[in-house]
Amino acid sequence: MAQEYISGMGKDSVVPEEIKGWNWGAFLLNWIWGIGNSTFIALLMLVPLVNLVMIFVLGAKGNEWAWRNRTWRDVAHFKSTQRKWRNAGFVLIFIILPVMVMPLMSIMKGEAYDLSVKAVQANSQVISLVGENPEPGFFVLGQITYRGTGGSANLNYSIKGTKSGADVYVYATSSADQWQLKELLVIDKKTGERVIVLTQSE
């Protein structure tokens, strides 16, 4: 006779072997998934540093916790619901977030960014450091602040040439909607060697 599994009884619930394993919904949606599955330990994802470990714990233990913490009609109902959580997580990570990031990247890759890339690519010391044709990576980190017709930009991005890669640090200011580079530093990722392309005093 097949064993009957009863969910929602906490530690007294016996977890079916067939549902054990990695839970992508818990991993990708973590605390949101936790609320929806009555697994409130997932709220530890809101605690800095703890969340670095908790995200993997949720992925590994999510199925067992969800089975014990919430009542399910049967195993099929449980699997169907967790597939929906998984699909929602994939949509968020691979569709919604990229759509949100693209406009941000276009803002960061403005005039200050363009000026810095041109200066880096034209600098002989940078070319000697990373090799020919240094190209910037996709991501640009930092902050751009506007005040009236002026503003400032602190940017950080990576470049890669034929020899190696490096990090680029940019400080630029804007006056009357005209951007001007103030500081531009390139640091080799492997050796830490620095090339000061431009300093505030120049």
Image (cartoon, helix red, strand yellow):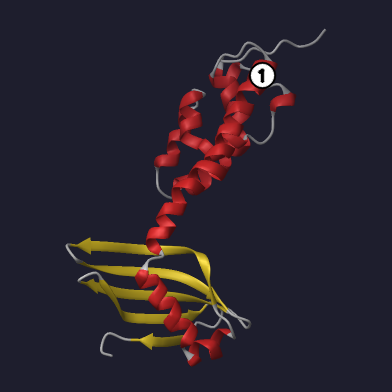
Q: Residue at x 50, y 41 (%)?
A: 96
- Label 1 crowd bin: few (<14), some (14–19), many (20+), radius 10 Å: some
Q: Is residue 21 left or right of residue 168?
A: right
Q: Is residue 32 visible?
A: yes
Residue pictured at 59% horizontal, 85% vertical: 132
Q: Nearer the viewer, residue 53 or 76?
A: 76
| Tally of marks | 1
Element assignment for label 1: loop
Specify the quadrant of the image occupied by residue 168.
bottom left
- Determine if residue 193 is in view: no
Q: Residue furthest left?
A: 148
Q: Quadrant of the N terminus?
A: top right
The structure residue drawn at horizontal position 52% and vertical position 24%, both measured from the top left corner, is 37
Q: Is residue 46 above or below residue 166?
A: above
| Residue with the mark numbered 1 | 14
Residue 93 in the figure: left or right of residue 178: right
Above or below, 81 relative to 60:
above
Image quadrant holding the C terminus, namely bottom left
How far across and down, in percent of the image, does residue 94 sit? 57, 44
What is the quadrant of residue 142 in the picture? bottom left
Identify residue type, mark 1: Val
**Horizontal side of residue 105 vs 82, given as left or right:** left
Q: Nearer the viewer, residue 33 or 39?
A: 33
Q: Position of residue 108 (x, y in %)?
A: 39, 62
Q: Residue at x 37, y 66 (%)?
A: 110
